[in-house]
Amino acid sequence: MKIAYFLDIPCGLGGAGNLLLQQAGIMAKNHNVIVVIPCDEQGNVNIEYAGRCEKSGLVYRTLYYETSFNFYDIDYLQAVLSSKIIRKFVIQEKIDFLHSVQINLAVEMVSRELKIPHLMNIYQLREEEFRLVYLDIFAKYHLCDSELYAKKWSSCLGIKSRCVRPVAPLSHIINRRYVRRQHYRIVMLGDVCSRKNQLMAIKAVERCLKEYNVTLEIAGNCSDSYGGTCQIYVEQHHLSESVVFRGFISDIAVLLRDCDILLCTSTDESFPMSIVEAVTYGLTIISTPVAGVPEVFHDRYNAYIAGGFGAEDIEASIRDCIHDFKSGDIESIQEHARETWEQNFSPDRVREQIDQYYHYIVKDGHIGDADLYGPNLTEQLYKLREAVTQEDGNPDHVSKRVLYYAYLKKQKFCGKAYIWGAGKLGRQAHELLRLLELDIEVIAFVDKNKMGMYCGLPIIKPEEIKYDEVDYFLISFAVGRDEIINYLNEQRLMYVEKIFLLP
Protein backbone atom coordinates (compact mmCIF):
# COMPACT_ATOMS: atom_id res chain seq x y z
CA MET A 1 0.00 0.00 0.00
CA LYS A 2 1.00 3.61 -0.42
CA ILE A 3 0.47 5.29 2.93
CA ALA A 4 0.49 9.02 3.71
CA TYR A 5 1.40 10.02 7.26
CA PHE A 6 0.10 13.45 8.30
CA LEU A 7 2.06 15.12 11.11
CA ASP A 8 0.62 17.64 13.54
CA ILE A 9 2.30 21.05 13.97
CA PRO A 10 4.04 23.58 11.65
CA CYS A 11 6.89 24.34 14.06
CA GLY A 12 8.64 22.62 16.94
CA LEU A 13 8.59 18.95 17.89
CA GLY A 14 5.43 17.35 19.22
CA GLY A 15 5.67 14.08 21.10
CA ALA A 16 2.65 12.64 19.29
CA GLY A 17 3.91 13.80 15.89
CA ASN A 18 7.38 12.42 16.55
CA LEU A 19 5.86 9.04 17.42
CA LEU A 20 3.89 8.98 14.14
CA LEU A 21 7.10 9.86 12.31
CA GLN A 22 8.84 6.92 13.95
CA GLN A 23 5.94 4.67 12.98
CA ALA A 24 6.25 5.87 9.38
CA GLY A 25 9.93 5.01 9.51
CA ILE A 26 9.44 1.40 10.57
CA MET A 27 6.43 0.87 8.26
CA ALA A 28 8.53 1.97 5.26
CA LYS A 29 9.97 -1.54 5.36
CA ASN A 30 6.54 -2.98 4.44
CA HIS A 31 4.87 -0.18 2.49
CA ASN A 32 5.42 2.79 0.18
CA VAL A 33 5.53 5.67 2.65
CA ILE A 34 5.23 9.45 2.25
CA VAL A 35 5.19 11.88 5.17
CA VAL A 36 3.15 15.08 5.06
CA ILE A 37 4.37 17.97 7.23
CA PRO A 38 2.08 20.93 7.93
CA CYS A 39 3.51 24.33 7.01
CA ASP A 40 2.41 27.63 8.51
CA GLU A 41 0.30 30.24 6.72
CA GLN A 42 3.43 31.72 5.13
CA GLY A 43 4.47 28.34 3.74
CA ASN A 44 7.36 27.79 6.16
CA VAL A 45 8.17 24.15 6.77
CA ASN A 46 8.70 22.57 10.19
CA ILE A 47 12.49 22.20 10.04
CA GLU A 48 12.57 19.76 12.98
CA TYR A 49 10.26 17.30 11.24
CA ALA A 50 11.89 17.87 7.85
CA GLY A 51 15.34 17.20 9.29
CA ARG A 52 14.18 13.97 10.89
CA CYS A 53 12.61 12.82 7.61
CA GLU A 54 15.85 13.51 5.76
CA LYS A 55 17.90 11.72 8.41
CA SER A 56 15.60 8.68 8.15
CA GLY A 57 15.45 8.74 4.35
CA LEU A 58 11.70 9.36 4.30
CA VAL A 59 10.06 11.15 1.39
CA TYR A 60 8.02 14.12 2.58
CA ARG A 61 5.77 16.90 1.30
CA THR A 62 4.52 20.07 2.96
CA LEU A 63 0.87 21.15 2.86
CA TYR A 64 -1.13 23.72 4.80
CA TYR A 65 -3.61 22.24 7.27
CA GLU A 66 -4.32 22.42 10.99
CA THR A 67 -4.84 19.82 13.70
CA SER A 68 -6.26 19.90 17.21
CA PHE A 69 -5.61 17.73 20.25
CA ASN A 70 -9.08 18.49 21.69
CA PHE A 71 -12.61 19.15 20.47
CA TYR A 72 -12.76 22.73 21.75
CA ASP A 73 -10.09 24.00 19.34
CA ILE A 74 -11.21 22.30 16.12
CA ASP A 75 -11.22 24.74 13.19
CA TYR A 76 -13.90 23.18 11.00
CA LEU A 77 -14.00 25.87 8.33
CA GLN A 78 -10.24 25.81 7.82
CA ALA A 79 -10.46 22.03 7.50
CA VAL A 80 -12.94 22.48 4.64
CA LEU A 81 -10.42 24.65 2.80
CA SER A 82 -7.44 22.40 3.59
CA SER A 83 -9.30 19.29 2.48
CA LYS A 84 -9.25 20.59 -1.11
CA ILE A 85 -5.44 20.80 -0.99
CA ILE A 86 -5.14 17.36 0.61
CA ARG A 87 -7.61 15.81 -1.84
CA LYS A 88 -5.49 16.97 -4.78
CA PHE A 89 -2.34 15.57 -3.15
CA VAL A 90 -3.97 12.20 -2.36
CA ILE A 91 -5.20 11.77 -5.94
CA GLN A 92 -1.89 12.81 -7.50
CA GLU A 93 0.14 10.50 -5.25
CA LYS A 94 -2.37 7.64 -5.55
CA ILE A 95 -2.57 7.18 -1.79
CA ASP A 96 -4.22 3.97 -0.54
CA PHE A 97 -4.24 4.61 3.20
CA LEU A 98 -4.26 7.71 5.43
CA HIS A 99 -2.61 7.78 8.86
CA SER A 100 -2.78 11.03 10.86
CA VAL A 101 -1.99 12.29 14.34
CA GLN A 102 -4.30 14.37 16.56
CA ILE A 103 -7.74 15.40 15.27
CA ASN A 104 -7.34 16.15 11.57
CA LEU A 105 -10.78 16.85 10.10
CA ALA A 106 -9.35 17.79 6.70
CA VAL A 107 -7.88 14.30 6.26
CA GLU A 108 -11.11 12.70 7.44
CA MET A 109 -13.09 14.74 4.92
CA VAL A 110 -10.86 13.44 2.13
CA SER A 111 -11.10 9.90 3.50
CA ARG A 112 -14.88 9.97 3.29
CA GLU A 113 -15.04 11.62 -0.11
CA LEU A 114 -12.51 9.30 -1.78
CA LYS A 115 -13.42 6.19 0.27
CA ILE A 116 -9.86 5.74 1.56
CA PRO A 117 -9.28 4.23 5.05
CA HIS A 118 -8.12 6.69 7.71
CA LEU A 119 -6.44 5.85 11.02
CA MET A 120 -5.80 8.54 13.66
CA ASN A 121 -3.34 8.57 16.52
CA ILE A 122 -4.46 10.61 19.52
CA TYR A 123 -3.81 10.23 23.21
CA GLN A 124 -4.82 11.67 26.58
CA LEU A 125 -7.89 13.87 26.87
CA ARG A 126 -10.17 14.81 29.75
CA GLU A 127 -13.10 12.42 29.63
CA GLU A 128 -15.56 15.27 30.17
CA GLU A 129 -14.50 16.86 26.89
CA PHE A 130 -16.09 14.03 24.92
CA ARG A 131 -19.39 15.68 25.82
CA LEU A 132 -18.56 18.29 23.17
CA VAL A 133 -18.92 15.67 20.43
CA TYR A 134 -22.31 16.01 18.78
CA LEU A 135 -21.52 15.20 15.13
CA ASP A 136 -20.26 11.95 13.61
CA ILE A 137 -17.34 13.60 11.81
CA PHE A 138 -14.28 11.85 13.25
CA ALA A 139 -12.10 9.00 12.00
CA LYS A 140 -13.52 5.52 12.56
CA TYR A 141 -10.22 3.90 13.54
CA HIS A 142 -7.90 4.90 16.36
CA LEU A 143 -4.42 3.94 17.53
CA CYS A 144 -3.12 4.67 21.02
CA ASP A 145 -0.15 3.70 23.20
CA SER A 146 -2.09 2.80 26.35
CA GLU A 147 -5.00 0.46 26.97
CA LEU A 148 -6.52 3.10 29.23
CA TYR A 149 -6.95 5.72 26.52
CA ALA A 150 -7.62 3.21 23.75
CA LYS A 151 -10.68 2.07 25.68
CA LYS A 152 -11.67 5.64 26.50
CA TRP A 153 -11.61 6.83 22.88
CA SER A 154 -13.40 3.69 21.73
CA SER A 155 -16.21 3.91 24.27
CA CYS A 156 -16.65 7.70 24.23
CA LEU A 157 -16.45 8.20 20.46
CA GLY A 158 -17.90 4.88 19.32
CA ILE A 159 -14.90 3.97 17.15
CA LYS A 160 -12.55 0.99 16.90
CA SER A 161 -9.27 1.32 18.73
CA ARG A 162 -6.10 -0.64 19.41
CA CYS A 163 -3.16 -0.15 21.72
CA VAL A 164 0.34 -0.37 20.27
CA ARG A 165 3.21 0.81 22.45
CA PRO A 166 5.68 3.49 21.30
CA VAL A 167 8.43 2.24 18.99
CA ALA A 168 12.00 2.18 20.24
CA PRO A 169 14.46 4.54 18.50
CA LEU A 170 16.97 1.73 17.85
CA SER A 171 16.65 -1.75 16.38
CA HIS A 172 18.34 -3.23 19.45
CA ILE A 173 18.61 -2.44 23.13
CA ILE A 174 21.84 -1.11 24.63
CA ASN A 175 23.06 -3.46 27.35
CA ARG A 176 24.93 -1.90 30.23
CA ARG A 177 27.12 -3.47 32.85
CA TYR A 178 26.18 -2.01 36.19
CA VAL A 179 28.76 -1.34 38.85
CA ARG A 180 28.53 0.34 42.21
CA ARG A 181 29.10 4.04 41.94
CA GLN A 182 29.28 7.12 44.10
CA HIS A 183 27.43 9.53 41.78
CA TYR A 184 24.11 9.01 39.98
CA ARG A 185 22.94 11.04 36.98
CA ILE A 186 19.18 11.26 36.62
CA VAL A 187 17.64 12.68 33.45
CA MET A 188 14.16 14.00 32.65
CA LEU A 189 12.93 14.55 29.07
CA GLY A 190 10.12 16.77 27.81
CA ASP A 191 8.85 20.34 28.11
CA VAL A 192 8.93 21.76 31.62
CA CYS A 193 5.22 22.12 32.35
CA SER A 194 2.71 21.37 35.09
CA ARG A 195 1.57 18.03 33.70
CA LYS A 196 5.19 16.82 33.58
CA ASN A 197 5.40 17.70 37.29
CA GLN A 198 9.13 18.54 37.32
CA LEU A 199 8.85 20.64 40.48
CA MET A 200 7.99 17.53 42.49
CA ALA A 201 10.99 15.78 40.92
CA ILE A 202 13.26 18.65 41.96
CA LYS A 203 11.93 18.53 45.53
CA ALA A 204 12.37 14.74 45.65
CA VAL A 205 15.97 15.00 44.48
CA GLU A 206 16.57 17.77 47.01
CA ARG A 207 15.50 15.40 49.78
CA CYS A 208 17.82 12.68 48.49
CA LEU A 209 20.84 15.01 48.42
CA LYS A 210 21.13 14.72 52.19
CA GLU A 211 22.28 11.12 51.69
CA TYR A 212 23.23 10.56 48.05
CA ASN A 213 25.35 12.27 45.41
CA VAL A 214 22.74 12.82 42.71
CA THR A 215 22.46 15.15 39.71
CA LEU A 216 19.13 15.85 38.00
CA GLU A 217 19.39 16.98 34.37
CA ILE A 218 16.18 18.37 32.85
CA ALA A 219 16.16 18.38 29.04
CA GLY A 220 13.19 20.27 27.58
CA ASN A 221 11.82 23.70 26.78
CA CYS A 222 11.51 25.81 29.92
CA SER A 223 9.77 28.93 28.65
CA ASP A 224 6.40 29.14 30.41
CA SER A 225 5.51 30.28 33.93
CA TYR A 226 5.76 26.78 35.39
CA GLY A 227 9.31 26.50 34.06
CA GLY A 228 10.10 29.81 35.68
CA THR A 229 8.71 28.55 38.97
CA CYS A 230 10.99 25.51 38.80
CA GLN A 231 14.05 27.63 38.02
CA ILE A 232 13.28 30.04 40.87
CA TYR A 233 12.92 27.13 43.30
CA VAL A 234 16.30 25.75 42.25
CA GLU A 235 17.95 29.15 42.68
CA GLN A 236 16.34 29.95 46.02
CA HIS A 237 17.22 26.52 47.45
CA HIS A 238 20.81 26.64 46.20
CA LEU A 239 20.41 23.56 44.01
CA SER A 240 22.10 24.85 40.85
CA GLU A 241 24.96 22.36 41.11
CA SER A 242 22.57 19.42 41.51
CA VAL A 243 19.69 20.42 39.19
CA VAL A 244 20.62 21.45 35.65
CA PHE A 245 18.21 22.85 33.03
CA ARG A 246 19.55 21.87 29.60
CA GLY A 247 16.76 23.25 27.41
CA PHE A 248 15.48 21.48 24.31
CA ILE A 249 17.91 18.92 22.88
CA SER A 250 17.10 17.59 19.41
CA ASP A 251 19.32 14.52 19.66
CA ILE A 252 18.99 13.17 23.19
CA ALA A 253 21.00 9.99 22.51
CA VAL A 254 24.25 11.51 23.82
CA LEU A 255 22.57 12.56 27.05
CA LEU A 256 20.96 9.15 27.55
CA ARG A 257 24.28 7.38 27.05
CA ASP A 258 25.81 9.44 29.85
CA CYS A 259 23.01 9.08 32.42
CA ASP A 260 21.99 6.24 34.72
CA ILE A 261 18.31 6.79 35.50
CA LEU A 262 15.32 8.19 33.63
CA LEU A 263 12.83 9.95 35.89
CA CYS A 264 9.27 10.52 34.69
CA THR A 265 6.95 12.34 37.10
CA SER A 266 4.03 13.08 34.75
CA THR A 267 0.51 13.44 36.10
CA ASP A 268 -1.21 13.51 32.69
CA GLU A 269 0.14 11.40 29.85
CA SER A 270 -0.86 8.37 27.82
CA PHE A 271 2.47 6.53 27.68
CA PRO A 272 5.69 8.56 28.00
CA MET A 273 7.93 8.14 24.97
CA SER A 274 10.87 9.16 27.15
CA ILE A 275 10.56 5.86 29.01
CA VAL A 276 10.86 3.87 25.79
CA GLU A 277 13.88 5.90 24.68
CA ALA A 278 15.56 5.44 28.06
CA VAL A 279 14.97 1.67 28.23
CA THR A 280 16.46 1.39 24.75
CA TYR A 281 19.67 3.04 25.96
CA GLY A 282 19.82 0.85 29.04
CA LEU A 283 18.73 3.39 31.66
CA THR A 284 16.83 2.36 34.76
CA ILE A 285 13.27 3.72 34.90
CA ILE A 286 11.62 5.58 37.78
CA SER A 287 8.08 6.75 37.01
CA THR A 288 4.84 7.89 38.53
CA PRO A 289 1.87 5.56 37.90
CA VAL A 290 0.59 7.69 35.02
CA ALA A 291 -1.95 6.20 32.54
CA GLY A 292 -0.39 3.29 30.61
CA VAL A 293 2.84 2.97 32.60
CA PRO A 294 1.46 0.48 35.17
CA GLU A 295 0.12 -1.63 32.28
CA VAL A 296 3.73 -2.48 31.36
CA PHE A 297 6.02 -1.59 34.27
CA HIS A 298 5.79 -2.94 37.81
CA ASP A 299 7.55 -1.68 40.90
CA ARG A 300 10.81 -3.44 41.79
CA TYR A 301 10.30 -5.88 38.88
CA ASN A 302 11.29 -4.02 35.69
CA ALA A 303 11.22 -0.42 36.95
CA TYR A 304 10.48 1.70 40.01
CA ILE A 305 6.88 2.94 40.13
CA ALA A 306 6.08 5.60 42.70
CA GLY A 307 3.06 5.21 44.91
CA GLY A 308 1.75 8.63 43.87
CA PHE A 309 2.68 11.95 42.30
CA GLY A 310 4.08 13.87 45.26
CA ALA A 311 7.68 14.58 46.23
CA GLU A 312 7.66 11.99 49.02
CA ASP A 313 6.40 9.26 46.66
CA ILE A 314 9.06 10.08 44.08
CA GLU A 315 11.78 10.33 46.72
CA ALA A 316 10.94 6.84 47.99
CA SER A 317 11.33 5.38 44.50
CA ILE A 318 14.67 7.17 43.96
CA ARG A 319 15.92 5.73 47.25
CA ASP A 320 14.75 2.23 46.31
CA CYS A 321 16.53 2.50 42.98
CA ILE A 322 19.83 3.70 44.46
CA HIS A 323 19.63 1.01 47.14
CA ASP A 324 19.36 -1.65 44.42
CA PHE A 325 22.26 -0.11 42.53
CA LYS A 326 24.38 -0.47 45.65
CA SER A 327 23.20 -4.00 46.46
CA GLY A 328 23.44 -5.31 42.91
CA ASP A 329 19.72 -6.12 42.70
CA ILE A 330 19.55 -3.64 39.83
CA GLU A 331 20.76 -6.38 37.47
CA SER A 332 17.51 -8.32 37.91
CA ILE A 333 15.45 -5.15 37.35
CA GLN A 334 17.34 -4.42 34.15
CA GLU A 335 17.03 -7.96 32.83
CA HIS A 336 13.27 -7.78 33.21
CA ALA A 337 13.29 -4.34 31.55
CA ARG A 338 15.07 -5.82 28.54
CA GLU A 339 12.40 -8.53 28.27
CA THR A 340 9.72 -5.82 28.45
CA TRP A 341 11.45 -3.94 25.63
CA GLU A 342 11.43 -7.01 23.36
CA GLN A 343 7.76 -7.73 24.04
CA ASN A 344 6.46 -4.18 23.70
CA PHE A 345 8.80 -1.62 22.10
CA SER A 346 11.14 -3.33 19.64
CA PRO A 347 10.67 -2.01 16.08
CA ASP A 348 9.94 -5.50 14.75
CA ARG A 349 7.20 -6.07 17.31
CA VAL A 350 5.59 -2.65 16.76
CA ARG A 351 5.81 -3.01 12.96
CA GLU A 352 4.02 -6.34 13.13
CA GLN A 353 1.22 -4.99 15.33
CA ILE A 354 0.62 -1.87 13.22
CA ASP A 355 0.68 -3.83 9.97
CA GLN A 356 -1.90 -6.25 11.34
CA TYR A 357 -4.13 -3.30 12.24
CA TYR A 358 -3.71 -1.72 8.79
CA HIS A 359 -4.87 -4.93 7.10
CA TYR A 360 -7.76 -5.26 9.54
CA ILE A 361 -8.91 -1.70 8.74
CA VAL A 362 -8.71 -2.26 4.98
CA LYS A 363 -10.71 -5.49 5.30
CA ASP A 364 -13.23 -3.98 7.73
CA GLY A 365 -13.75 -1.05 5.36
CA HIS A 366 -15.73 1.30 7.62
CA ILE A 367 -15.73 4.76 6.05
CA GLY A 368 -17.86 7.53 7.56
CA ASP A 369 -20.75 9.26 5.81
CA ALA A 370 -19.41 12.03 3.56
CA ASP A 371 -22.78 13.82 3.64
CA LEU A 372 -22.20 14.80 7.29
CA TYR A 373 -19.54 17.17 5.96
CA GLY A 374 -22.07 18.63 3.56
CA PRO A 375 -22.67 22.22 2.40
CA ASN A 376 -25.50 22.80 4.89
CA LEU A 377 -23.22 22.44 7.92
CA THR A 378 -20.51 24.53 6.29
CA GLU A 379 -22.96 27.31 5.42
CA GLN A 380 -24.38 27.26 8.96
CA LEU A 381 -20.91 27.62 10.48
CA TYR A 382 -19.92 30.44 8.10
CA LYS A 383 -23.01 32.37 9.21
CA LEU A 384 -22.18 31.71 12.85
CA ARG A 385 -18.62 32.93 12.31
CA GLU A 386 -19.93 36.17 10.83
CA ALA A 387 -22.17 36.62 13.86
CA VAL A 388 -19.52 36.06 16.54
CA THR A 389 -16.81 38.15 14.88
CA GLN A 390 -18.85 41.15 13.78
CA GLU A 391 -17.65 43.44 16.59
CA ASP A 392 -14.25 42.01 17.51
CA GLY A 393 -12.39 42.60 14.28
CA ASN A 394 -12.48 38.88 13.56
CA PRO A 395 -9.95 37.72 16.20
CA ASP A 396 -8.26 34.53 15.09
CA HIS A 397 -9.11 32.33 18.06
CA VAL A 398 -12.81 33.26 17.93
CA SER A 399 -13.22 32.62 14.20
CA LYS A 400 -11.59 29.19 14.55
CA ARG A 401 -13.97 27.85 17.22
CA VAL A 402 -17.33 28.10 15.48
CA LEU A 403 -17.93 24.33 15.74
CA TYR A 404 -17.61 24.66 19.52
CA TYR A 405 -19.92 27.68 19.53
CA ALA A 406 -22.46 25.74 17.48
CA TYR A 407 -22.39 23.11 20.23
CA LEU A 408 -22.99 25.79 22.88
CA LYS A 409 -25.98 27.17 20.97
CA LYS A 410 -27.56 23.70 21.01
CA GLN A 411 -27.44 23.55 24.82
CA LYS A 412 -30.34 24.80 26.92
CA PHE A 413 -28.48 27.23 29.13
CA CYS A 414 -30.41 29.18 31.69
CA GLY A 415 -28.91 30.88 34.71
CA LYS A 416 -26.17 33.09 36.12
CA ALA A 417 -22.42 32.84 35.67
CA TYR A 418 -19.02 34.08 36.71
CA ILE A 419 -16.39 34.79 34.08
CA TRP A 420 -13.00 33.74 35.47
CA GLY A 421 -10.46 36.16 34.07
CA ALA A 422 -10.88 39.94 33.90
CA GLY A 423 -8.73 40.53 30.86
CA LYS A 424 -9.07 40.77 27.10
CA LEU A 425 -10.34 37.19 26.81
CA GLY A 426 -12.84 37.84 29.59
CA ARG A 427 -14.21 40.83 27.71
CA GLN A 428 -14.50 38.73 24.55
CA ALA A 429 -16.32 36.00 26.50
CA HIS A 430 -18.77 38.55 27.87
CA GLU A 431 -19.47 39.84 24.37
CA LEU A 432 -19.76 36.33 22.91
CA LEU A 433 -22.55 35.44 25.29
CA ARG A 434 -24.60 38.24 23.71
CA LEU A 435 -23.65 37.39 20.13
CA LEU A 436 -24.43 33.70 20.66
CA GLU A 437 -27.71 34.65 22.33
CA LEU A 438 -27.08 32.30 25.24
CA ASP A 439 -29.46 32.65 28.19
CA ILE A 440 -26.66 33.31 30.70
CA GLU A 441 -26.39 36.38 32.92
CA VAL A 442 -22.87 37.25 34.05
CA ILE A 443 -22.93 38.70 37.58
CA ALA A 444 -19.17 39.21 38.15
CA PHE A 445 -15.64 38.53 36.96
CA VAL A 446 -13.29 36.42 39.06
CA ASP A 447 -9.62 37.44 39.10
CA LYS A 448 -7.07 37.08 41.89
CA ASN A 449 -4.86 39.85 40.49
CA LYS A 450 -7.41 42.58 39.77
CA MET A 451 -10.07 44.56 41.57
CA GLY A 452 -12.76 47.15 40.87
CA MET A 453 -15.11 47.00 37.89
CA TYR A 454 -14.75 45.49 34.42
CA CYS A 455 -17.25 45.66 31.55
CA GLY A 456 -19.65 47.25 34.01
CA LEU A 457 -19.43 44.31 36.43
CA PRO A 458 -17.62 43.84 39.76
CA ILE A 459 -14.36 41.89 39.98
CA ILE A 460 -14.18 39.48 42.91
CA LYS A 461 -11.40 37.31 44.33
CA PRO A 462 -11.64 33.49 44.17
CA GLU A 463 -12.23 33.36 47.93
CA GLU A 464 -15.28 35.62 47.49
CA ILE A 465 -17.09 33.24 45.15
CA LYS A 466 -20.64 32.39 46.25
CA TYR A 467 -21.24 29.01 44.69
CA ASP A 468 -24.94 28.96 45.53
CA GLU A 469 -25.55 32.14 43.50
CA VAL A 470 -24.32 30.95 40.08
CA ASP A 471 -24.98 28.09 37.69
CA TYR A 472 -21.95 28.31 35.40
CA PHE A 473 -18.27 29.23 35.37
CA LEU A 474 -16.73 30.51 32.13
CA ILE A 475 -12.93 30.13 32.05
CA SER A 476 -11.47 33.02 30.05
CA PHE A 477 -7.68 32.89 30.20
CA ALA A 478 -5.08 30.73 28.47
CA VAL A 479 -2.40 29.69 30.97
CA GLY A 480 -3.34 27.53 33.95
CA ARG A 481 -6.88 26.59 32.90
CA ASP A 482 -6.56 22.97 34.04
CA GLU A 483 -5.59 24.11 37.52
CA ILE A 484 -8.79 26.16 37.85
CA ILE A 485 -10.93 23.41 36.31
CA ASN A 486 -9.51 20.93 38.82
CA TYR A 487 -10.15 23.42 41.64
CA LEU A 488 -13.79 23.81 40.56
CA ASN A 489 -14.11 20.03 40.23
CA GLU A 490 -13.26 19.86 43.93
CA GLN A 491 -16.28 22.12 44.49
CA ARG A 492 -18.36 19.43 42.73
CA LEU A 493 -18.68 21.37 39.50
CA MET A 494 -18.22 19.38 36.29
CA TYR A 495 -16.32 20.52 33.20
CA VAL A 496 -18.57 20.78 30.09
CA GLU A 497 -21.59 20.78 32.36
CA LYS A 498 -21.15 23.74 34.69
CA ILE A 499 -17.67 24.81 33.55
CA PHE A 500 -16.99 25.97 29.99
CA LEU A 501 -14.11 27.58 28.15
CA LEU A 502 -14.89 30.91 26.47
CA PRO A 503 -13.93 32.42 24.07
Image: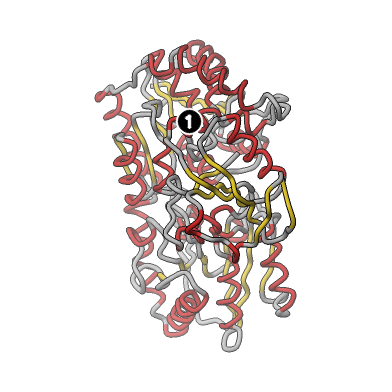
**Residue 23 quadrant:** top left
x then y, percent, for residue 280: 46, 57
In this rendering, is residue 165 above or below 331? Answer: above
- The residue under the point 37% across, 56% down is 292
Q: Is residue 177 left or right of residue 391?
A: left
| Quarter of the image with the N terminus in it | top left
Q: Amino acid at mark 1?
A: Lys
Q: Which residue is under mark 1?
A: 409
x then y, percent, for residue 210: 60, 88
| Quarter of the image with the C terminus in it | top right
Observer able to see residue 349: no
Q: Nearer the viewer, residue 351 or 193?
A: 193
Q: Nearer the viewer, residue 35 or 103?
A: 103
Q: Nearer the viewer, residue 220 or 1?
A: 220
In this rendering, is residue 96 above or below 225? Answer: above
x then y, percent, for residue 362: 30, 24
Q: Is residue 424 left or right of residue 212?
A: right
- Check disc 1: other Cα within 10 Å, few if <14, some if 14-19, many if 20+: some
Q: Is residue 324 left or right of residue 457?
A: left
Observer able to see residue 431: yes
Q: Is residue 389 left or right of residue 330?
A: right
x then y, percent, for residue 277: 50, 55
- The residue under the point 55% across, 44% down is 501
- The residue under the point 60% across, 55% down is 480
- The residue under the point 41% across, 76% down is 330
In this rendering, is residue 260 above or below 386? Answer: below
